[in-house]
Image (spheres, rainbow, N blue to C red):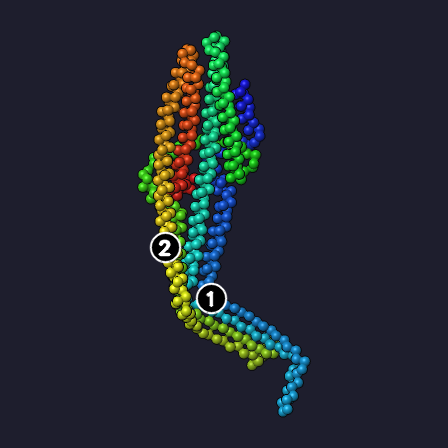
Amino acid sequence: MVIALIYSIIGLRATDAQQRQITLKETIDGAIANSNLLKMNKARVNEAMSKYDQAKDQSMPTGAVGATYSYAQIPANHINLGSIDWVLPKSAEAYVGGASLNEIIFSGFKLKYARESTNLLAEITQLEALKNKDLVIYTAIQMYFDLYKTVQTQKVISQNMAAIDSLVKQAQQFYEHGIVTQNDILRFKLQLSETAIMAADLEANRKIISYNIVVLLGMPEGTDLMPDTVNLSGDHPGTLQQYRDEAFGNRQELKQSTLQARIDKDFIRSTKADMLPKLSANVGLNYIHAGADFIPSAGSFIAPISVGATVSWNFSSLWFNKNKVSEAHIRQQETFIEKNTISDEIRTEVSGAYQNYLRTSNKVMLLQVSIDEARENDRMQSDRYRGNVASVTDRLDAATRLYGALTNMELARADAMLAWYTLMKATGKIAQIN
């Protein structure tokens, strides 16, 4: 009765939601496609590239073109000052135009350093996007294996319930023949009830995890997900030093720190460049015509052309920028220290992930031996119970150990696979194995 009830409860999931099976790769791809974090990163990369283009534009010449038309009405146009008697026109018009072009020839290479720094910042932004992509992938993998472990545990619990239900029926037959007592039947039913409660809790937990993955992937809320089969990695683990070397070559944090050091170096150069003289060249054309005709006649306008060069030196920057350079050197030193800190953290992370992968892999092999022993013990206790030699407690303990070992095996297999992905994340290769 109990097992029928719990199966009916668990079976409701097929009618309440649209159930579909999903693979690990589909989960990863969906998380990448739906991640708001990665969408924001993409926008920031585009923004950084736009700033780099703007920095390149700063090296182009500056120029301006302008034209002015003016009209003056002169109501009092008669001037009489003794011998001076002027009669001005009632109105006057004028056309004034100009064009100029200015090119910076030398500014201490400030524009060059600005372009380099902006380009490096764009690269750092791209590396940040890659780092966040690794984080999104790993989060999706963790959630998938949470679902996988829950479902695999459910399968073992379901087998356990079926086995205990069979024991209940067997005990009832033995009771009719006077082999066992009513208390034996009650003990089996109690064990079945406890296992059914565990199954109900697992199903509730599975639905929560499934919903979280649905939200992560942006799928319809009515979707009920079930994991596909996951196989343990067949790769033979390399040495710890090999994984450390890969991490130092792949991790985005170290690449970002290296680029930041180059930005600090360019900032120092740019600050020192402020202390140098500046040289620029310019050319200008002006047009002045005081007349009413839009197209003037010859001799009624002037159009001077000017060409020049300017050398300037703000020598006060020699003492104003001195401490700025010192501050830039301090910032550069902080970047070096931060890089060393990141290196230590990566070294520790890789070492921990490597040892955890070895531990979980060895645990799978050891649990296989444990399962074989538990299965043999369960068979022996079953024979002894049917022969009325073993007690109901011995029979239940044997069954509990067997299904406990089976559950531990499924959890250990999932943990070993997750440990492998954790090691790949630590070495900066998790996106390459997708």
Disc 2 crowd rating (10 Å Cα; few below 14, some 14-19, many 20+) is some
Query: Where does the C terminus fall, quadrant-wise?
Result: top left
The answer to which of marks 2 and 1 sits earlier in the sequence is 1
Q: Circle 1 — which element?
A: loop
In this rendering, the answer to whether 59 lies above or below 254 is below
Disc 1 crowd rating (10 Å Cα; few below 14, some 14-19, many 20+) is few
Task: Looking at the picture, tell me which residue is in the foreground, 111 or 154.
Answer: 154
Residue 279, given in percent of the width and then of the height, sits at 42, 70
What residue is shown at x 39% (from left), y 62% (from top)?
A: 323
Q: Amino acid at mark 2?
A: Gln
- Picture disc at residue 155: none
Q: Amino acid at mark 1?
A: Pro
Q: Residue furthest right?
A: 75
- Picture disc at residue 333: 2
Residue 382 occupies which quadrant of the picture?
top left
Residue 197, given in percent of the width and then of the height, sits at 51, 25
Whole-angstrom CA distance, mark 2 to mark 1, is 36 Å
In this rendering, the answer to whether 246 lies above or below 229 is below
Q: Residue furthest front?
A: 183
Residue 360, given in percent of the width and then of the height, sits at 37, 32
Q: Tell me, yes or no, if residue 139 can be seen here.
A: yes
What residue is shown at x 46% (from left), y 27% (from top)?
A: 153
Disc 1: which residue: 61
Query: Where does the N terminus fall, quadrant-wise?
Result: top right
